[in-house]
Image (cartoon, rainbow, N blue to C red):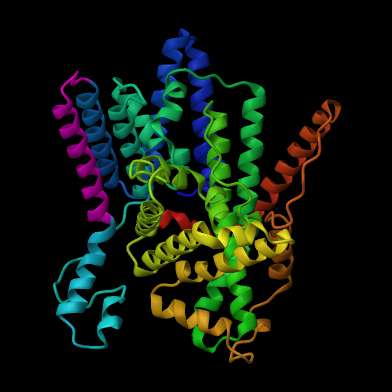
Amino acid sequence: MVFSSLIFITIFLPLCLGAYFVIPALLRLPDESTLKLKNVILLIFSLVFYAFGGVYYIALLLFVVLINFVGGHVIGNSGDSAGYRKAALVLTVSADILVLFFFKYFNLLIALIENMFFSGEGSFFTRLFMAEGNGALGFEKIVLPIGISFYIFQALSYVVDVYLGNAAVQKNFFRFALYISFFPQLIAGPIVKYKDIEEQIGCRTVNTDLFSDGVIRFCRGLGKKVIIANTLGEMVDSVWAVDVSTIGAATAWFTAICYSFQIYYDFSGYSDMAIGMGKMFGFEFKENFNIPYASSSVREFWRRWHISLSSWFRDYVYIPLGGSRKSKAATYRNIFIVFLLTGIWHGANQTFLIWGLVYGVLLILERAFLGKLLESSPLKYISRLTTFTVVTILWVIFRADDISLAFSFIASMFRSGSGDYGLLSFLSLKVIITFIFAFVFSGFFKLKKGSEKEETKAEYKVIDYVTALVLLVISTILLTNGTYNPFIYFQF
């Protein structure tokens, strides 16, 4: 089940909201008991939500919850015994990583072994970067549970923060289970650190303003996803479905830019919906995007894109490695490691590995000298355009099924001539209009916000309500008539 589906919008979410607010109100329990009941309701609905992705994987989710709950308990109650605390941390983190590796990377490991040792076809380089195996070892493919990368990282943040003393041990199993499985951010984030949400699990309220802000935010995210991302996604997929070596440069560039907009509106739309639903239930999640295409450097881009992932790697990998506190060589090494892991986190494909490594190299070069050149540019839009171009080319690698296909597409972007498939073969008025809106609202031409007068806030609120209603109606109509509705980050 995805947020941008009719069953979720018309059945699941209304039922969850109704149960969350109506049942406690009818029972008239004390405040403490009311919150406990609300947490139980959210936990039940979260497990039901996850069951739509595969009933059997609920057991895996609960297993992760259990080992991290026990691990955190042992770490937090080992007193001054540093050895026990460290051993518990190592065992819990190792268990999390093994679970993630098995379900996410075992298929790739088998494919590498099969291609390298049980196939004589192609060159060494070709066999090394083949995404699929040849079946020589006879292993069945492991199906990737949706959202596993996100909830494993949330579990890791809990045990590490407890070990470092940045968060208290959660003694209530059901509260901890809710932290890991809360359905708005379970499948595709934002990645929520336990220390940022522990107080809200045990004490929160919902008022009219917070709830209405959540509804508005949800509708905006829904519009981003259904109206913009889905429309551009259909066009992008139709281009990638043909032989990309035969498309012209105009088609390749337009498709690449459309994908840049698609993945932004798709993922930021999901994050908006998650943050909006969190507000409806009294939770405040941190922002996950901040107009990333307004960035004037790759470094700035990663401060604005998928902020919860970037901050996770900063807090739990980059800073523990020494951050930028040591020598330049150590800093460059730390950056390289972080983006190597960032690429690997995104998926079991060499395309993600190369995508992450290239970003690591670019960030090192920016720290060395390129950053100063970009910052000293007399025209800020030149730096933005340069950054957007680099990001767009790298999205091609991210989007491709294998690295050879990515190189073939990039080659088409710099090929002369129109190719066998010209741009007009894929354009429609709907795509053109959507592309214009996507560009205008992408933040590339970021405007400086003026001061907001107090007396105009009510007017803006009315506009927000009307806009949200229009987006909800249009999105519902499109969902009723359409079939294209995947979330890109569900595969991670």
Q: Where 197 falls versus 58 (above or below)?
A: above
Is any part of residue 189 visible from this angle? no
* Image quadrant assignment for residue 215: top right
Percent x, y for residue 465?
74, 37
Of 319 and 55, which appears nearest the observer?
319
Percent x, y for residue 128?
27, 77
| Most common SS among magenta residues | helix
Q: Which residues are magenta?
A: 77-103
131 part of magenta stretch: no
Query: In the rendered view, does 216 fall on the left or right side of 448?
Result: left
Q: Where 36 falls versus 93 (above or below)?
A: above
Q: Where 388 falls versus 147 (above or below)?
A: below
Is any part of residue 265 visible from this angle? yes
Of 60 and 364, which appears nearest the observer?
364
Q: Residue at x 36, y 37 (%)?
A: 47
Q: Residue at x 41, y 28 (%)?
A: 195
Percent x, y for residue 358?
44, 66
99 part of magenta stretch: yes
- Image quadrant holding the C terminus, namely bottom left
Q: Residue at x 17, y 38 (%)?
A: 91
Of 364 and 86, which appears nearest the observer?
364
Percent x, y for residue 401?
41, 72
